[in-house]
Image (cartoon, rainbow, N blue to C red):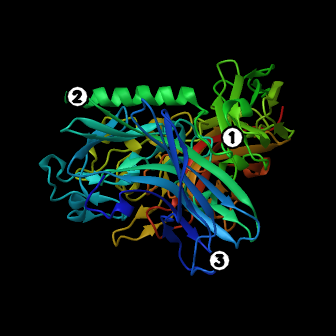
C-alpha cells in the first residue's frame, strides 16, 4: 500500500453522506470503535470492525456499520464485506455513494488493467499535478511526465469506467517483483441500477475501487435516501482482493490468471464462508425460471423469442423502476437464444420481475409480485412482452440497445488522445469528443435524410450544444428529413424517441416549421447523468412516445426539427438510443 499516505488512507471503506440541514455531503471513512474476532481456526479467520451511531456526538453518521475481513487457507488474498444497518428511530439520511478504495505504492504499481483492451502504463499523481487541467476537472493533459512516453496524453479516471456487468476484475501490476493486485467482484446482487449501470474501476494514483452504489452516469437518483425513522439493512460484498505473482515479466500472464481467478470466484457464489447471519448461504436462497417472448404483430404474427433479454428481480415498483432502485438487492441474468432464463441464488424477499430486450424498445414488468423463500423454485412458464407499438414502421434511426454506440463517434483532436483508447472498443471514452460537433458543424446543424443518410456516419453520437467564437455554448437543432408519398387522413402517427442518456436537457420537436412558437411535442427538463463529460455512451434510459396528428404532415417531403434547448455548457445534451416513426394503426 502507498506508504506516503497515513495508514487510514491506504485502504479503506468510505461513503458520502448528508443530513437535511447540511449544505454539502461529508466524506467519511467511518473509523471503527470496536474490534472482534468472529471466527478463527486452521482454515479461516474472520474479523469485524464496527462503528455504532452516537446520537450525542457532533455530526455523526447515523448508521451502524460492521466491516468484515476474511482470510482463507490456500487463498492468495483476502475478502471484505460490510453490513450497513439503520434501526428504527434514526434521523433522515442521504447516502450518495459507498465503496472500498485501495491505494497502492505508485513507485511500484505502474501498469493498470481494467479489460482486455484497456491496459497501460499509467501516469502518477505527480504527473497529473504538473499537467494541464482541461474543461472537466478530472481530465488532465500530461505535460511533464516522469515517463516521456506519456507526454501530451490525456488522463481521466472516467476513461476507465465500465458497465457493472463488466466490472468483474481490474487492478495493477508491479514490474519488480512481478506482482498483481486485483479487485474481483463475483456478483452484482448488492449493486444498484442494473447490469448496465456504469461506474469507476481503477485509475491513476494506483487506485482500485470496489463501488457498491454511486450517482455516476445516472445522477442523484442512484443514492440511498432514508426517511426519519426508516429502518434499513443491506450487505455489501464480499469482494475479493487477489494477489498473484511469477518470476517473469509478461503482464498478460498475471492478467489472464486474474481472470481465471475471477471465474473461479464467480462459480463459488454465493460464498459459504461469511459468518454474518445477514448473509444467506446458497441453501437459504431461491430460484426462478421461465421464458420470455415478444409479441409485436407488426414484426411477426406469432410471438418471437426474447433473445438475450436482460431479466432481473428488484424491489417492487413501477415498470423500469429498477434503474433507480437502491435500497434492495437485484438479481439479473440474460435469456438464451430462445428466451429461456433462470436466476439462482436469490435472497428471500418480495420482488418484481423486470426485463428489457435488445432490439426492442421499452420495459417489461411481470404483473404479479413474487415472494422468494428459502429453497423455493418458481417456474413462471411463458411470459409475453407487448412492447410499445401503434402502427407499422415507416423509418427508424439507430438500434434499440440503450446505448449510442452505433452512431458516429469522432476521433479526438491531436493532443487530446489517450492512446490506449485508440484501438479499444470504447473509442467514445476519448476526451473532448463533444466539442468535435462544432468542428464538424461549425455553422449549420446536423441534417439526417431518411433513406440516404447512414446513422453510423451521419448521426453524431450526442446531441450537444455548439461552441461559438466567443466560447459560449448555444442550443442546437437537428433535422430529420423524410418522404411520405401519401399522408393517411384517417389516423394518427407515432414518433418514439428513446434516449440513452440526458444531462440538463429539454428536447423540443417541431414538424415542418422550425419557427412555430410552440413545439408540436417536447420532453420535460430531464437528466443529470453527466455521461457526455464522463465519456459514457449511455446513462439512464428513457422512452418518449409522441402522437402526431395527420394534419401536421404533408404529402412529399417532411422535416422533424429536434431542438435541445438548454445551452450554457458543453456537457448539456442527450444521447439518442433509437428513433422510430410509425404510421397509423392497421
Q: Is residue 219 above or below residue 24?
A: above
**Could you say which quadrant of the image residue 516 lies in?**
bottom right
224 sits to left or right of 552: left
The answer to whether the residue labelled 1 contacts the one labelled 2, judged by CB atoms less than 8 Å apart, is: no
- Residue at image x 26%, y 31%? 251
Residue 421 lies, in percent from the top left, at 32, 41
Q: Which residue is mark 3?
A: 55
- Residue at image x 48%, y 36%? 168
- Residue at image x 50%, y 30%? 265
Q: Which disc number belongs to residue 250?
A: 2
The CA distance from mark 1 to mark 2 is: 53 Å
Tag 2 or tag 1, which sits nearer the N-term? 2
Q: Is residue 44 visible?
A: yes
Relative depth, front residue between 220 and 492? 220
Q: Which residue is mark 1?
A: 581
* Mark in the foreground, 1 or 2: 2
Relative depth, front residue between 550 and 363? 363
580 sits to left or right of 125: right
The CA distance from mark 3 to mark 2 is: 54 Å
Location of the C terminus by quadrant is top right
The CA distance from mark 1 to mark 3 is: 58 Å
Q: State the SS at label 3.
A: loop
Q: Which disc number belongs to residue 136?
A: none
Farthest residue, direction front: 41
Residue 25 lies, in percent from the top left, at 53, 72
Pointer 3 local density, CA inside 10 Å: few below 14, some 14–19, many at least 20: few
Tag 3 or tag 1, which sits nearer the N-term? 3
* Mark in the foreground, 3 or 2: 3
Q: Is residue 102 above or below residue 186?
A: below
Amino acid at each position: 500500500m502507498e506508504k506516503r499516505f497515513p495508514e487510514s488512507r491506504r485502504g479503506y471503506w468510505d461513503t458520502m453522506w448528508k443530513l437535511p440541514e447540511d449544505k454539502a455531503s461529508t466524506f467519511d471513512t467511518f473509523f471503527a470503535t470496536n474490534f472482534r474476532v468472529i471466527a478463527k481456526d486452521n482454515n479461516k479467520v474472520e474479523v469485524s470492525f464496527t462503528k455504532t451511531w452516537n446520537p450525542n456526538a457532533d455530526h455523526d453518521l447515523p448508521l451502524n456499520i460492521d466491516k468484515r475481513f476474511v482470510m482463507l487457507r490456500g487463498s492468495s488474498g483476502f475478502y471484505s464485506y460490510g453490513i450497513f444497518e439503520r434501526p428504527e428511530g434514526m434521523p433522515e439520511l442521504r447516502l450518495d455513494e459507498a465503496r472500498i478504495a485501495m491505494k497502492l505504492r505508485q513507485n511500484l504499481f505502474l501498469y493498470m488493467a481494467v479489460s482486455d483492451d484497456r491496459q497501460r502504463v499509467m501516469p502518477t499523481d505527480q504527473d497529473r499535478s504538473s499537467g494541464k487541467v482541461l474543461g472537466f476537472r478530472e481530465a488532465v493533459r500530461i505535460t511533464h511526465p516522469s515517463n516521456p512516453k506519456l507526454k501530451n496524453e490525456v488522463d481521466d479516471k472516467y476513461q476507465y469506467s465500465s458497465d457493472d456487468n463488466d466490472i468483474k476484475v481490474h487492478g495493477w501490476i508491479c514490474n519488480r517483483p512481478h506482482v498483481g493486485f486485483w479487485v474481483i467482484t463475483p456478483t452484482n446482487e448488492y449493486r444498484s441500477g442494473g447490469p448496465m449501470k456504469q461506474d469507476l474501476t481503477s485509475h491513476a494514483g494506483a487506485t482500485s475501487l470496489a463501488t457498491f452504489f454511486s450517482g455516476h452516469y445516472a445522477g442523484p437518483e442512484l443514492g440511498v435516501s432514508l426517511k426519519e425513522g426508516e429502518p434499513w439493512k443491506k450487505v455489501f460484498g464480499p469482494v475479493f482482493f487477489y494477489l498473484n505473482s511469477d518470476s517473469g515479466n509478461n503482464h498478460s500472464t498475471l492478467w489472464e490468471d486474474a481472470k481465471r481467478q475471477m471465474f473461479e470466484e464467480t462459480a463459488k457464489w454465493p460464498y459459504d464462508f461469511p459468518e454474518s447471519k445477514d448473509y444467506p448461504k446458497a441453501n437459504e436462497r431461491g430460484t426462478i425460471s421461465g421464458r420470455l417472448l415478444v409479441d409485436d404483430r407488426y414484426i411477426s404474427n406469432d410471438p418471437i423469442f426474447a433473445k438475450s433479454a436482460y431479466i432481473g428481480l428488484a424491489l417492487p415498483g413501477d415498470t423500469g423502476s429498477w434503474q433507480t432502485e437502491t435500497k434492495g438487492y437485484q438479481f439479473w441474468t440474460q435469456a438464451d437464444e430462445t428466451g429461456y432464463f433462470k436466476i439462482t441464488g436469490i435472497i428471500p424477499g418480495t420482488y418484481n420481475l423486470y426485463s428489457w430486450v435488445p432490439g426492442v424498445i421499452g420495459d417489461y414488468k411481470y404483473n404479479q409480485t413474487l415472494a422468494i423463500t428459502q429453497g423455493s423454485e418458481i417456474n413462471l412458464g411463458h411470459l409475453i412482452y407487448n412492447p410499445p407499438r401503434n402502427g407499422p414502421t415507416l423509418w427508424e434511426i439507430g438500434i434499440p440497445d440503450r446505448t449510442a454506440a452505433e452512431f458516429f463517434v469522432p476521433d479526438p483532436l491531436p493532443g487530446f488522445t489517450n492512446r490506449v483508447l485508440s484501438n479499444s472498443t470504447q473509442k467514445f471514452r476519448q476526451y473532448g469528443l463533444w466539442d468535435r460537433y462544432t468542428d464538424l458543424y461549425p455553422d449549420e446543424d446536423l441534417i439526417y435524410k431518411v433513406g440516404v443518410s447512414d446513422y453510423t456516419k451521419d448521426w453524431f453520437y450526442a446531441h450537444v450544444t455548439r461552441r461559438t467564437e466567443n466560447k459560449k455554448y448555444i442550443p442546437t437543432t437537428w433535422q430529420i428529413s423524410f418522404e411520405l408519398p401519401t399522408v393517411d387522413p384517417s389516423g394518427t402517427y407515432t414518433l418514439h424517441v428513446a434516449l440513452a442518456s440526458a444531462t440538463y436537457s429539454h428536447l423540443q420537436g417541431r414538424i415542418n416549421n422550425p419557427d412555430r412558437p410552440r413545439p408540436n411535442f417536447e420532453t420535460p427538463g430531464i437528466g443529470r447523468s453527466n455521461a457526455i463529460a464522463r465519456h459514457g455512451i449511455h446513462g439512464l434510459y428513457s422512452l418518449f412516445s409522441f402522437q402526431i396528428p395527420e394534419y401536421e404532415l404533408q404529402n412529399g417531403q417532411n422535416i422533424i426539427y429536434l431542438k435541445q434547448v438548454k445551452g450554457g455548457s458543453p456537457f448539456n445534451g442527450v444521447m439518442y438510443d433509437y428513433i422510430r416513426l410509425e404510421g397509423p394503426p392497421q
